[in-house]
Image (cartoon, rainbow, N blue to C red):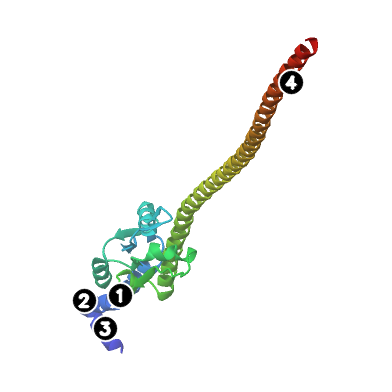
Amino acid sequence: MKKYFRKIKQNRVLLATLFIVSFIPVIYAGTFLASIWDPYSKIENLKISVVNEDEPVIFNGQNIELGNKISDNLKQSRTLNWQFTDLKTAEKYLTDGDTFMIVYIPKDFSKNSVSFLGENPQKVNISFKTNVSKSKSGEVISTNAAQKLSEQVRVQISENYSKILLSQLSNVQNGFSKAANGSEQISNGIGSLENGLNSANSGVIKLKNGAEKLNSANQKMAEASDKLAFSATEISNKTNLLSQNSENLQKGLQDFSA
């Protein structure tokens, strides 16, 4: 054994070769440990692809576009390296290891988000797709770390969704309030119109009563006129009779004086 060591010491090339070969595992282990020592220190550089295919909808006169709102909020966020692209490009990035995750917002996202206010509520989905085995960071980040990163993305998306949905529904509620106020004003107007019609009806009834009274007075006046005409005829007859009697009396007095 000593003989072999003595030969190695004498052969410097062989000695250097053995030293380098024995040092390779140390280099590899050190590089590997350094790469996964703190996987969250540069998380803001982690690329996440966002695919927004949501189509805005009109609900109670309000334009609901939750997908666009969420995308706008993520563009202002610096917690992760958000990349906004189409689905085909995002899947290519994921396959090539150029992105860690795909966040997919479907086209019926806004529509289903407000469906719970109707008779047929639909499930709201935002899908998350990862490919740890192909991702560059997935080769050095453990499965547990990948799950934590995925959960962080989900939480951020969910928070954005909740805030934006409440904001959008607040606008819808204001629309309902305005509609309710308008309905109340219409109801008050109908009440006023009904009162006006009642007053008009009351006036018509009074006018009818007045007309009936006037008609009754006209009838009484006609009857009085008839009675007056009859009395005038009687007076005329009595006057003629009195005139005849006066003539007869005068003739009688003349005969008596003769």
| First reached walking from the N terminus: tag 3 or tag 1 | 3
Q: Identify which residue, 174 or 224, lies in the foreground.
A: 224
Q: Secondary structure at mark 3?
A: helix
Whole-percent x, y for residue 151 in the image: 44, 68
Q: Can see residue 140?
A: no
**Comparing marks 4 and 1, which lies closer to the viewer?**
4
Q: Which residue is mark 4?
A: 245
| First reached walking from the N terminus: tag 4 or tag 1 | 1
Q: Which residue is mark 1?
A: 23
Q: Secondary structure at mark 4?
A: helix
Within 10 Å of disc 3 (Cα), the crowding (few <14, some 14-19, many 20+) is few
Separation of residues labelled 3 and 1 (CA atoms)? 21 Å
Q: Which residue is mark 2?
A: 12
| First reached walking from the N terminus: tag 2 or tag 1 | 2
Task: Name the residue type under label 1.
Answer: Phe
Q: Which residue is mark 3?
A: 6
